[in-house]
Image (spheres, rainbow, N blue to C red):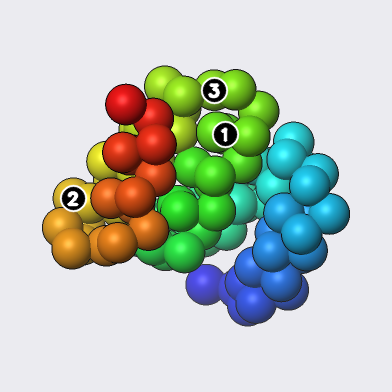
Amino acid sequence: MKNIAPLQKAAIQAAKEKDWEKAVELNLKVLNEKPHDLNALNRLALAQIQLGNPDEAKVALEKVLDLDKHNRIAQKNLERLK
């Protein structure tokens, strides 16, 4: 597995800059290398919410909760989608 720290950092920066399309792209790259990265899944969901893609966001959030049923970020964001 390659070092994904630069990808993670870039994904966080894209979100800070509200570049949601880039955030989606970068978080998907992180998840390609590390499919169970809860932070990347939560960031992906947030970006999808911001882009107006609630169904895609819900898929990512449900995956987070499958991996960590007590993840507060995912719980909160799923509530926002309802």
Amino acid on which the number 2 mark rests in the picture: Asp
In primary-sequence order, the first of circles 1 and 2 is: 1
Q: In the displayed structure, would residue 26 be above or below residue 10?
A: above
Residues under numbered marks 1 and 3 in contact, where contact means CB atoms less than 8 Å apart: yes
Mark sitting on residue 48: 1
Q: Residue at x 18, y 63 (%)?
A: 70
Amino acid on which the number 1 mark rests in the picture: Gln
Amino acid on which the number 3 mark rests in the picture: Asn
Q: Residue at x 54, y 23 (%)?
A: 53
Identify the element where label 1 is drawn.
helix
Q: Residue at x 15, y 58 (%)?
A: 69
Name the quadrant containing residue 14.
bottom right
Circle 3 residue: 53
Q: In the displayed structure, would residue 11 be above or below residue 76?
A: below
Q: Nearer the viewer, residue 53 or 81?
A: 81
Q: In the displayed structure, would residue 23 be above or below residue 2?
A: above
Circle 2 residue: 66
Please state the horizontal and vertical placement of residue 68, each as a whole percent of the image. Answer: 20, 62
Q: CA distance from mark 1 to mark 3?
A: 5 Å
Q: Nearer the viewer, residue 79 or 15?
A: 79
Crowding near the residue tagged with mark 1, few <14, some 14–19, many ≥20 C-alpha atoms within 10 Å: many
Q: In the displayed structure, would residue 64 be above or below residue 54?
A: below
Residues under numbered marks 1 and 2 in contact, where contact means CB atoms less than 8 Å apart: no
